Amino acid sequence: MRKTAIHIIRGHWTRDGAGVKLYRVFGDPRIAEITDPFLLLDHFGSRDPNDYMMGFPWHPHRGIETVTYLLNGEVRHRDSTGNEGVIGPGDVQWMTAGSGIFHEEMPKPIRKVALGGDEAYDTEVNGFQLWVNLPSKYKMRVPKYRNVLRRHIPVVELESGGKAVIITGRIRVSSYGVVEGPVNDLTTPIHYLNVQLPEESTFNYEVNDGYTALIYMVNGEASLDQWHIAKRGELVVLTRDGDEVVVRTGEKPARFLLMAGRPINEPIAWYGPIVMNTWDEIRRAFDELQRGMFIKARPEIQDY
């Protein structure tokens, strides 16, 4: 049975971190129940370094996973335990904050060397950060980084002529079989794909009955059922009933993110970058921050 649209949400422009200009697709405790297990999606992107060079200086996370997926530019990352690295074009950092991570994320333009040895910068930075909630029994787990390089993320050519980047999830390809994304050891089962479709084409994707399914239209427009057309910048929330997502383009091509996951169905206490189940847990987290007791364990690191 096909999942159909029940909500279309338009995001808003805002500034976060030290003043980074971004488009907040969603991220509001008041609607967290309908996007569960997803909490927030930011789309950051600009060719003007003044929009992003201030970055996201030192800040904490607890009780969630943050997924940074970059299309253009670089994001330099480091945390209070000495871990550091660079997320490049097409790369993903899947960070399970768990019991606590204190870190900074700084977007940068890419330095390129032209013919003749001249240096130049590609100033475009474009990417997404998705927040995924953790069930109560995993909120205080040992933190973990999954650093996934672009070359290890499969890109599937679709029969429609489009393509899908599979970060997590699976697609059945008639000429090959099942293709799975590299991130497959998550406590909350998630599907996360970047799909591009040409005009007059259809994308069908299997999602478990009962799962939340979201479509963020990055470019173009597409229909999700016979009544609803999603346009650029809009988020479509689909019914949990049904086991198939169907996206159809018309006269224009489209690019969208597909996110699906099993709802956690637990109480949410959310203050800034910390998401727990009770307000006592929130107060305890900020008290530990003030007393220098926030970090409980060094993060595990898994490189792909």
Image (cartoon, rainbow, N blue to C red):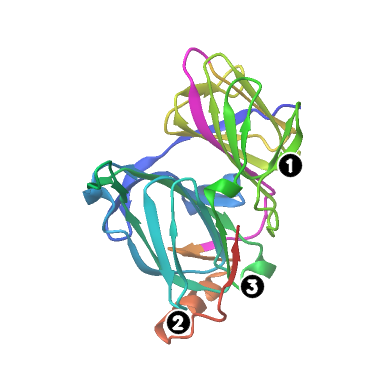
Which region of the structure is painted magenta? 250-269
Residue that carries the numbered disc 1 in the rendered image = 210
**Contact check, label 3 and label 2, Cβ < 8 Å:** no
Q: Amino acid at mark 2?
A: Asp
Q: Earlier in the sequence, mark 1 or mark 2?
A: 1
How many numbered markers are drawn? Answer: 3
Nearer the observer, 206 or 70: 70
Q: Amino acid at mark 3?
A: Arg
Q: State which quarter of the image contains the C terminus.
A: bottom right
Q: Where 110 falls versus 155 (above or below)?
A: below
Picture coordinates of residue 8, whole percent (x, y): 51, 32
Q: Is residue 42 visible?
A: no
User: In the image shown, does 72 or 226 lie closer to the viewer?
Assistant: 72
Residue placed under numbered mark 2 in the picture: 287
Q: Position of residue 105 (x, y in %)?
A: 38, 62
The amino acid pointed to by label 1 is Gly
Q: Earlier in the sequence, mark 3 or mark 1?
A: 3
Secondary structure under badge 2? helix
Q: Quadrant of the N terminus?
A: top right
Q: Residues within 10 Å of mark 3 (few under 14, many from 20)?
A: some
> Which numbered disc, 3 or 2, marks the residue that appears first in the sequence?
3
Q: Quadrant of residue 76?
A: bottom left
Name the image quarter holding residue 200.
top right
Q: Residues within 10 Å of mark 1 (few under 14, many from 20)?
A: some
Q: Residue furthest front?
A: 116
Compared with 149, 169 (above or below) is above
